[in-house]
Amino acid sequence: MIDRLTVDDLDACLALAQERDWPPERHKWALLFEVGTVYGVRDGAGRVIGTTILTRYGASLAAISMVLVARDHERRGIGGALMSHAIGEAGGATIVLNATEYGRPLYERLGFVTVGRTFTHIGHFTGVAEHASRPAGPGDLAAIHRLDTEVNGADRGILVDRLPGFAAEVRAVEGQGGITGYGAVWQNHDNGVIGPVVAETPRDARGLIADLAAGVEGPVRLDLDDRHPELFRWAVERGLDLATSTVVMAHGGPLPGDRRRWFVPMMQALG
Ligand SMILES: CC(C)(COP(=O)(O)OP(=O)(O)OC[C@H]1O[C@@H](n2cnc3c(N)ncnc32)[C@H](O)[C@@H]1OP(=O)(O)O)[C@@H](O)C(=O)NCCC(=O)NCCS
C-alpha cells in the first residue's frame, strides 16, 4: 500500500499539496526528493493521495515532513500508516518535525512530544544590511559542515553540500578561530526564505538575517525558533510580521546538539 515515490511523482505531490491549500513549492520538493525518502499512497487509479518524507541525518537524527492526505481520503488511517512506516524506517533515530494543528493529534498518538515552537514571520524587509557577515564560498563548506554538525548534534552534510546549488546566497560570520555562524537564503514559490541561521549570539544571528534579507527582492520568510524571542520584535520592526506558528515535536528523545546556537531552520521540512 505504501510506495516509494520518485522525482517523476513530483507533479503529483504538488497537485496533492495544492489540493490541501499548501503552495506548489517545486524547488523545495525537488530538494526533499534528493535528500530524503518520499513515501506515498496511491488510489486505484494511480493518483497520489498521501505523502510523507523521511530525511535521515546519519543514524541518530531524522526529520519527517510533507504529511499530506487528500481530502476525499481523510480519516481512514492513511496519515497514521504513512507516519508509522516512516518512524519504522528511521531505525530508532530521534525524529523531529514541525506540526500544524491538523497534524498534532496524530503525532501525539504516535509518541511525539512538543519540544518548542516556530514563529513564521513574513513581509518586505525594511531594515538594512549590517555587514556582520561575508559571502561564503565552496572553500567554506568544510568549516560550515563542522559547525552545523556541532550545533545539530548530527551530520547534515547532505544539506550543507547542496547549499551552494540550492540557496541564492550563503553567508558566514568569521570569529577569531574561524567560522562561528552561517546562514542562507533560498527562493521558494512566493518568497525568499531565510534559513538556516546558526550563530554564536543573537546579535550575530540578527546580523546574518539582515545581511541575507537585504538582498531579497519581494517578500521574505523567517521561521524564528522560540528559544530566541528577543528576535521577534526586531523582525516585526523591520517589516516581517508574525504570520503563523507551528509546534516542534520530537520522537525518541530530546533534540541533540547545541540548540542555543540554532536560530532558524533551513526549512521546517528539514527540522
Ligand atoms: C493531518 C492529515 C495528514 C491526517 O491524515 P489522515 O489520513 O486523515 O490521518 P488518519 O486517518 O490516520 O487519522 C486522522 C483521524 O482519523 C481517525 N481514523 C483513522 N482511521 C479511521 C477509520 N477507519 N474510521 C474513522 N476514523 C478513523 C484517526 O483516529 C484520527 O482521529 P482524530 O483526528 O480524532 O485523532 C490530513 O488531515 C492532512 O493532510 N491535513 C492537511 C495537511 C496537514 O496539515 N498535514 C499535517 C502537517 S504537520
Image (cartoon, rainbow, N blue to C red):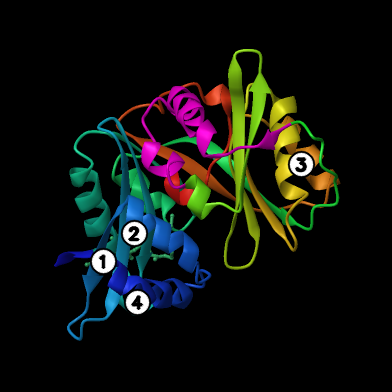
> Label 3, on which residue?
210
Callout in the foreground (4, 3): 3
Callout in the foreground (4, 2): 2
Q: What is the x, y in percent for residue 205?
A: 69, 31
Q: What is the x, y in percent for residue 199?
A: 62, 27
Q: Which residues are magenta?
A: 133-162
Circle 4 SS class: helix
Instruction: Tell me what residue is drawn at x 24 percent, y 45 percent.
Output: 87
For the residues labelled 3 and 1, the Cα–Cα distance comes to 37 Å
Amino acid found under the numbered disc labelled 4: Ala
> Label 4, on which residue?
12
Amino acid found under the numbered disc labelled 1: Thr
For the residues labelled 4 and 3, the Cα–Cα distance comes to 36 Å
User: Picture quarter containing residue 262?
Assistant: top right
Of callouts 4 and 3, the N-terminal one: 4
Q: Answer yes or no: do the residues labelled 4 and 3 have beta carbons within 8 Å?
A: no
Amino acid found under the numbered disc labelled 3: Ala
Q: Answer yes or no: do the residues labelled 3 and 1 have beta carbons within 8 Å?
A: no
For the residues labelled 1 and 2, the Cα–Cα distance comes to 7 Å
What numbered label is drawn on residue 6? 1
For the residues labelled 4 and 1, the Cα–Cα distance comes to 11 Å
Circle 3 SS class: helix
Of callouts 3 and 2, the N-terminal one: 2
> Label 2, on which residue?
33
Q: What is the x, y in percent for residue 77?
A: 24, 63
Disc 1 residue crowd, few under 14, some 14–19, many 20+, Cα 10 Å: some
Closest to the observer, 147 or 98: 147
Is 134 a magenta residue? yes
